[in-house]
Image (cartoon, coloured by chain):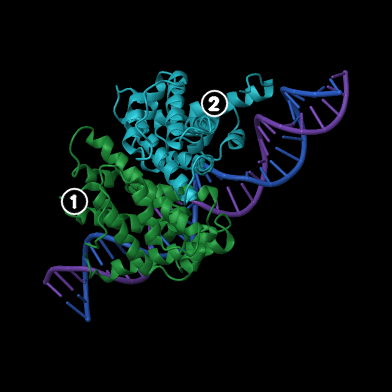
Chain colours: A green, B cyan, C purple, D blue
Amino acid sequence: MDEITGLRERKKAATRLALHESALRLAAEQGPDCVTIEAIADAANVSRRTFSNYFSSKEEALFHGDTVRLRRLLQLVCERPNTEPPWTALSRAAENVTRESSDDRDGGWLTRRRQLRGHPGLAAYQVAAYTAVERELAAELAHRLSGTAVELRSRLLTATFLAALRVAIQHWIDHPGHDLLEIVRTALAEVAPPSAAAPADDSTT
Amino acid sequence: MDEITGLRERKKAATRLALHESALRLAAEQGPDCVTIEAIADAANVSRRTFSNYFSSKEEALFHGDTVRLRRLLQLVCERPNTEPPWTALSRAAENVTRESSDDRDGGWLTRRRQLRGHPGLAAYQVAAYTAVERELAAELAHRLSGTAVELRSRLLTATFLAALRVAIQHWIDHPGHDLLEIVRTALAEVAPPSAAAPADDSTT
DNA sequence: ACCGATCTTGCCTAGTCGGCAAGTTTGCAC
DNA sequence: GTGCAAACTTGCCGACTAGGCAAGATCGGT
């Protein structure tokens, strides 16, 4: 990708990451509602106003990680060969992004995330992160479909896929000790459309 | 159900409905961001403070209709016989709630709703309404499942079903002139798990 | 008719969101 | 290096929101 970027871009990415991690840490420690934007900004050593330059709300900062992963997922799907059937492209991309994620998650991530579990007003924002890419992902899949009602079917495929992915990750957060990749595979297989033949278990990246 | 309620309950329902409809109308007319809570409250002839007694945000008021329908859906699913396979119970309940909805929607509903289409920050709240019932619905479905990983499978089933329902309705809003019930049927059939045999087309309510 | 529960309303505080205008940092061309 | 333009940070500001609290109004049951 864009390996080398200027100093400016790197600083921006650092600030955004610092804000995101401060938000996650503080929310896990004190509860999401007790944390003010000002506290998050302070923890990241920027002004309250700068926070607003990066995120439009506490919740957006909290789920920035999810947003990044989902955009990465979209990118991976776009990079898969056009000849690949839609569901296969989705599954392979999901497996890859799952593998990638397990690398750059630090130790405290799961713990903090688990402390935010079940908070009612928060789950909404997580789902919002998923639906934000839904239309773009559906548009990409539409290229790979043929037949009637392509638009409806691509949106259904995408929505189903994202829903399964979301449930898999939530299930993993709720039940410690399982292997995320395995849960993701199980979930995707469970909701795979009949059109998608049982995927051969080769690791053709 | 609870046919006869006291005056108090009826008044509460009326104000809640008035607030909801004022919100929908004003948001469609002036754009969702330009409308203040005060304006909505004024249009419904209550104080700004009373609005907060009913809804915790503009968006919650906007999508109150969706929330009601989804809770009704949950109720219908619970009322279906326990012997019915999960996906059948879901599909039948969805068809019924769709039929019911087409009655009590006034003429301007679809028009107003279409004007809110595509607003980015708004779609998030709609999805939130769906996920609010997801866990409850999954819990009900868990009773009807057997085998391994009941929790994961019931959540997957629910998430898939709700995603399909949401996409169907959005598709109907985006593309005027189609029959909602038909779109819902098509969508549900498209994502039906292989375990659910093609449903016989009898109208056993 | 009365009382207690519940609902409405206004007041008030803390917090959020985003425009604006300095002041500062970065990228780049010379 | 120097200088300039674009982009970023920051504080200040006003409009809006969320929700606690208490006074008054309304409803339901006896």
Q: Residue at x 21, y 53 (%)?
A: A78
- Which amino acid, mark 2? Leu
User: What number is the disc on residue A84?
Assistant: 1
Residue A205 can be seen in this image: no
Cα distance between the residues tagged 1 and 2 = 49 Å
* Residue named by callout 2: B17
Image coords of residue A6 (percent x, y): 25, 70
Residue B97 can be seen in this image: yes
Position of A2 with respect to B173 (left or right) is left
Position of B7 with respect to A68 (left or right) is right
* Towards the viewer: A144 or A138: A144
Q: Quadrant of residue A71?
A: bottom left
Count of numbered marks: 2
Q: Is the residue B23 above or below the residue B140 in the image?
A: above
Q: Chain of mark 2?
A: B
Q: Assign a secondary structure to mark 1.
A: loop
Image coords of residue A43 (percent x, y): 50, 68
- Which amino acid, mark 1? Glu
Q: Residue at x 24, y 69 (%)?
A: A5
